[in-house]
Image (cartoon, rainbow, N blue to C red):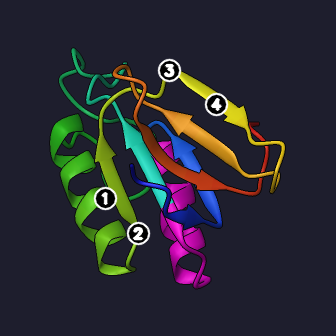
Amino acid sequence: MNTTRYDVVIVGGGAAGLSAATTLGRALRSVLVIDSGTPRNAPAAGVHGYLSRDGMNPGELLSIGRSELLSYGATVVDGEAVAAHRTPMDSRWFWEMPDSSPAGACSSPPA
């Protein structure tokens, strides 16, 4: 059972989730990103309106973003977060995967 405690858990490894996680990683926060690998912009031919990346393949953007994020010590779990629950003993939030295994824990509530 993975009960690693993180400062922040981000559900979704798209451009916004990776950007938020990278910013937190740069600020020396421990970050877990849970990503199902099914970005909403997958059918798009290119990314538009994202500074310096106009026309880039969405998958390439996510690959570059994930690599940058990992360089800051963040953790990425491939999978889907299906539930979050709080433990009464120590007030930690646990994020569950489909097989009911915890992906990680943090003190912040889901937002």
- Kindly identify which residue carries mark 3: 82
Choose mark 1 or mark 2, whichever is in front.
2
Residue 66 in the image: x percent, y percent?
28, 58
Question: Which comes sooner in the sequence, label 1 or label 4?
Answer: 1
Image location (x, y in percent) of residue 96: 49, 31
- Kindly indicate whether the residue at mark 2 contacts the one at mark 3 (C-beta within 8 angstroms): no
Q: Mark 2 is on which residue type? A: Ala
Q: Gap between marks 3 and 1, in whole Å?
A: 24 Å
Q: Is residue 50 visible to the viewer in this orientation of the structure?
A: no
Dominant SS in magenta = helix
Q: CA distance from mark 3 to mark 2?
A: 21 Å
- Does label 4 or label 2 sit earlier along the sequence? 2
- The amino acid type, in three-letter code, at marker 3 is Val
> Which amino acid, by three-letter code, is at mark 1?
Gly
Gap in angstroms between the C-alphas marked 1 and 4: 25 Å
**Label number found at residue 15:** none
Q: Earlier in the sequence, mark 1 or mark 2?
A: 1
Where is residue 102? Give x, y as percent. 46, 40
Q: Mark 3: few, some, or many residues within 10 Å (few <14, many ≥20)?
A: few
Secondary element at tag 2 = loop
In the picture provided, is 50 more to the left or to the right than 85?
Answer: left
Q: Position of residue 44 (x, y in %)?
A: 24, 19
Q: CA distance from mark 4 to mark 3?
A: 7 Å
Q: Nearer the viewer, mark 3 or mark 2?
A: 3
Residue topped by disc 4: 84
Quarter assignment of residue 87: top right
The magenta segment is: 14-31
Element on which disc 3 rests: loop
